Image (spheres, rainbow, N blue to C red):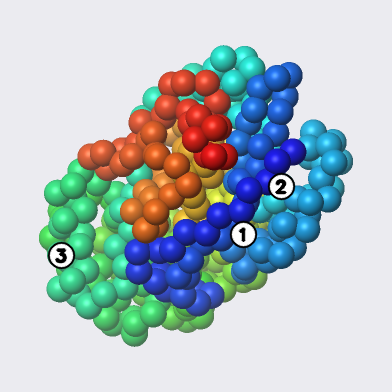
Amino acid sequence: MRIRNFALDLRQPLTTATGDIERREGFLVAVDVDGHTGIGEATPLPGWTESLDDCRAALDGVDHPKTAIETDALADTPAARHAVSLALADARARRDDTPLAASFASNPHTSLPVNSTVGDAPVEQTVEAAENAVSAGFDCLKLKVGARDTGADITRLRAVREAVGDDVSIRADANGAWDRWTADRVLAAISDLDLEYVEQPLPAEELAGHAVLRRRHDTPIALDESLASVPPVRALASNAADVLVCKPMALGGPDRVLDVASRARNAGVDIVVTTTIDAVVARLGALHVAAALPGERAHGLATASLLDSDVAADPAPVRDGKMSVPESPGLGIDPDAVLD
């Protein structure tokens, strides 16, 4: 197994619930299966995964990639596990001369809608960003909320709905910023806006509170940060979500997401796949995973524009609010282009 480190700056700092992100550092991993090379990526994000140092130590300790995955030796380092799992899947799909998505599902999507993330800005700038996204072809917007007072967020959501009309889906992402009383008040106030869902209104560990919100309000509830705090099976068992937002990097690989998706379907819960602001290898992996899932929801994969550069050219850019799934074997990217 070969390992190459990389570092990519963001075009501008991204504010999240756990602090600003200015740079993404990680490792590219190459694994050979039956004479075919597969590529994986580990881009740790503290708060979601292990640290960069722990990730490298875990990768350095892998003697046999297949054994490491089968024995769950990387269970405590999800980013490292993601890299190895993705590289193995890529190599096997190349060996079988099939796109990665087709190795995951018998009839995968060939193109997927993706959402445009509209950051936390005053109402005029928020509306302008939303209108620009719709003009660029996006029909699903994700608005960041929770950093401002609730009145301002409600005003922003109403203004965007009025500006883009009823044909555009709107998601609101609070990143766990509200307490139960605040979330209850906001959900009541926006009940007429027909939001696709409100993502992580309460802190990650408050599964019972999310379940109460689901019972009290018609607006669907999605869990994101909770999946980094509790096992997904527990989140499903708690009846706390209509949607699980799954990050392959944080869950430990494409196989983990596909397993969660299968369990979620049995529980009547949908899946949206998103990235952790990854390089092109992990973004492609997430795209193939999303393509293997049923349903028509937009996924959170339009994050390449946040990076100032990348480890290789992107074969699946966003066009008109959609991403086409590469048809060439494996991930759809030349391993040599990534490793050189």
Earlier residue among tags 1 and 3 = 1
Q: What type is the residue that disc 3 sits on?
A: Glu
- Any mark on residue 128, and which? 3
Q: Is residue 80 left or right of residue 337?
A: right
Q: Position of residue 51 (x, y in %)?
A: 68, 66
Measure how far apart labels 2 and 1 are at the Cα level.
11 Å
Using a 10 Å C-alpha cutoff, classify the residue at mark 1 as few (fewer than 14 neighbours), some (14 to 19) or many (20 or more).
many
Residue at horizontal 53%, vertical 75%?
Answer: 18
Residue sitting at x 43%, y 34%: 295
- The answer to whether residue 49 is seen in the rendering is yes
At horizontal 66% and vertical 37% (from top left) the residue drawn is 30
Instruction: State the residue position of label 1.
Output: 44
Work out which residue is located at the far front of the displayed protein and give it. 340
> Which residue is at a point 83% across and 37% down the rendered structure image?
64
Q: Where is residue 131 drawn, in percent x and y?
A: 15, 57
**Considering only order in the chain, which callout, 1 or 2, is on the residue closer to the N terminus?**
1
- Decide which of tag 2 and tag 3 comes sooner along the chain: 2
Amino acid type, label 2: Arg
Identify the element where label 2 is drawn.
helix
Q: Which residue is mark 2?
A: 81
Taking depth in this image into account, of 322 and 186 the one nearest to the observer is: 322
Viewer can see residue 233: no
* Secondary structure type for disc 1: loop
124 left or right, relative to 48: left
Quadrant of image for the N terminus: top right
Nearest the eye: 65 or 144 = 65
Q: CA gap, disc 2 to disc 3?
A: 40 Å
